[in-house]
Amino acid sequence: TLFATSTLEQNESEDAANTPSNSLHLSEISDDDLDDDDSLHQNPNHRDNGKTRLLYNMASSENCTDDGECDGDISLVEERSVLSLNSNYDGNTNTLRIQAVKKNMLTLTTLAAIGGFLFGYDTGVISGAMPPIQRAFDLNTIQQEIIVSSTVLSAFIASLFGSSLNTIKGRKYTILFASAVFTIGAVNMGIAWSYSSLVIGRIIVGVGIGLASLTTPIYIAEVAEPAMRGTLVTINGLLICFGQFTAGMVDGILDQVDEDNGWRLMLGFAAIPSIIMFIGFLFLPESPRWLVMVGRSDEALQVLLNVRTSDREAMDELKEIEQVCSVMDANVNAAAVNN
């Protein structure tokens, strides 16, 4: 049962004692009233199946009876601070929500961990692709070393700048950018027409690897449920090894199929998972921690409500994030003052 509270003003005049009061009246609103469109004018989008506690105010009316009943309008006021901490929906609804959260966790972890797979695949695929590439472009030892090491070097440099990009643009944007860059690099390597074009493609791919390998563990840790963070972040590392294993298998198979041009498919194959990651992340939410960092706490709350099994858990985590961000801001300001 939801209550609309207000105070009764007392009229000092004796004649006003027997007249209806124009002030607000304390009224009790039952769950049946919530479904009655005639007695309650509410936005159905704010109802949220009983999971959100709503604050109602009875507007003043001149048509109040002696029993204290008023014909005034009822207005809806919904605030984040009155989000329900008492889940009054049934067990079936709660079960459906838990299942939906688990599905969301699986989806975002799978898509985010593709970054780890790409890292492992591209660092491993070059070992099998190098012999046919050497034959195709008649490379010397130094040129082969440059092709192999250029990706690792560009990944290292990109990871240094990736932190700033994560802070300014957010985790989701950084992963989308990394996916797009990786796709461009993989396609470029697959159609490489010279030694120089192949090196350029390797450098571009390295930028994507550096950004993705830095950002995806952060994203998983910040969006995943606290009890699942360790496991889900470990999956990202597991997929790095799986990517290296896959690269070895692809190298062996394609080298048997086409000894001269199989290397193009070996290198270009990496575009497929990067495209999947890009498309998938278009529909995934931004990290709630980053949203709080940039002052978008309301959006962070909506994200947490979709990836947590209860409103209480979402609200508690939001408060924790806000406290941590406040401490970080205070430390940064203190350091700036000292400097």
Image (cartoon, rainbow, N blue to C red):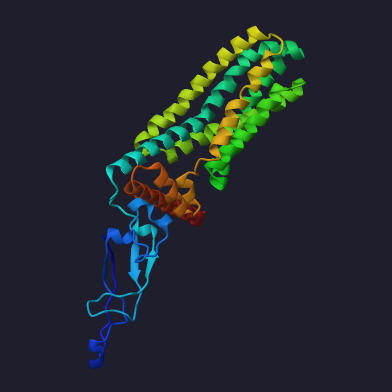
Q: Is residue 324 above or below residue 226?
A: below
Quadrant in the rendering for residue 68: bottom left
Residue 286 in the figure: left or right of residue 306? right
Q: Quadrant of the N terminus?
A: bottom left
**Residue appearing at x 68%, y 26% in the figure:** 187
Q: Position of residue 78 (x, y in %)?
A: 39, 61
Q: Is residue 51 visible?
A: no
Residue at x 54%, y 38% (from the top left corner)? 281
**Which residue is more in the foreground, 158 or 87?**
87
Q: Position of residue 116 (x, y in %)?
A: 52, 27
Give whichever of 21, 69 is nearer the camera: 69
In the image shown, does 325 or 45 lie closer to the viewer? 45
Q: Is residue 82 above or below residue 165?
A: below
Q: Position of residue 300 (x, y in %)?
A: 45, 49
Q: Is residue 225 left or right of residue 7?
A: right
Spot occupied by residue 111 in the image (x, y as percentages of width and height)? 51, 32
Q: Is residue 168 left or right of residue 141?
A: left
